[in-house]
Image (cartoon, grey):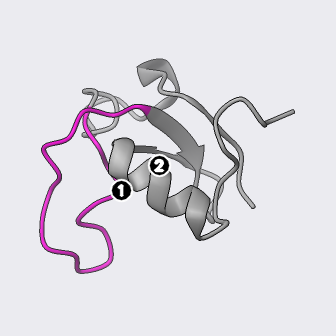
Amino acid sequence: MHRSQTFDPAIHEPGTPAAEGRCSHHGEDGGSGECAGEAVVSFEDGHGGWRSGCRLALEDLVERGEIEPLGQGA
């Protein structure tokens, strides 16, 4: 399970959708395209980097056990 926190644009690579406050989770890995949703969560990916997620991504990732629910990190 990966760490998560309330969205923080400062921890994301400049110029990325995440740094601009958008969801970087949807559309990855050959998905249907870039998400227009506002980022509400920052979370570690499997490669040691940080990604962002909209409300729907947050719910899905928590349900699948991939990230911790907000407020549950150490």
Vertical order, 63 against 5 (above or below): below
- Left or right of 22? Residue 67 is right
Write the start and end of the magenta stretch as one range: 22-40
Q: Is residue 20 magenta?
A: no
Q: Which quadrant is the N terminus positioned in?
A: bottom right
Vertical order, 22 against 30 (above or below): above
Q: Residue at x 48, y 22 (%)?
A: 8
Q: Amino acid at mark 2?
A: Leu
Where on the picture, by quarter, is residue 33? bottom left
Find the distance from the CA under tag 1 to the CA under tag 2. 9 Å
Q: Secondary structure at mark 2?
A: helix
Q: Residue at x 12, y 44 (%)?
A: 36
Q: Is residue 25 magenta?
A: yes
Name the disc covering residue 25, or none.
1
Q: Residue 3 in the image: x percent, y percent?
A: 71, 45
Dot 1 or dot 2, earlier in sequence? 1
Q: Name the magenta segment's main secondary structure.
A: loop
Name the disc covering residue 57, or none.
none
- Left or right of 63? Residue 33 is left
Q: Residue 66 in the image: x percent, y percent?
A: 64, 64
- Left or right of 11? Residue 70 is right
Q: Residue at x 28, y 27 (%)?
A: 21
Q: Amino acid at mark 1?
A: His
Vertical order, 37 against 27 (above or below): above
For disc 2, the neighbor class at 10 Å (few under 14, some 14 to 19, many from 20) is many
Q: Residue at x 29, y 44 (%)?
A: 23
Vertical order, 53 against 62 (above or below): above
Where does label 2 land, which residue? Answer: 58
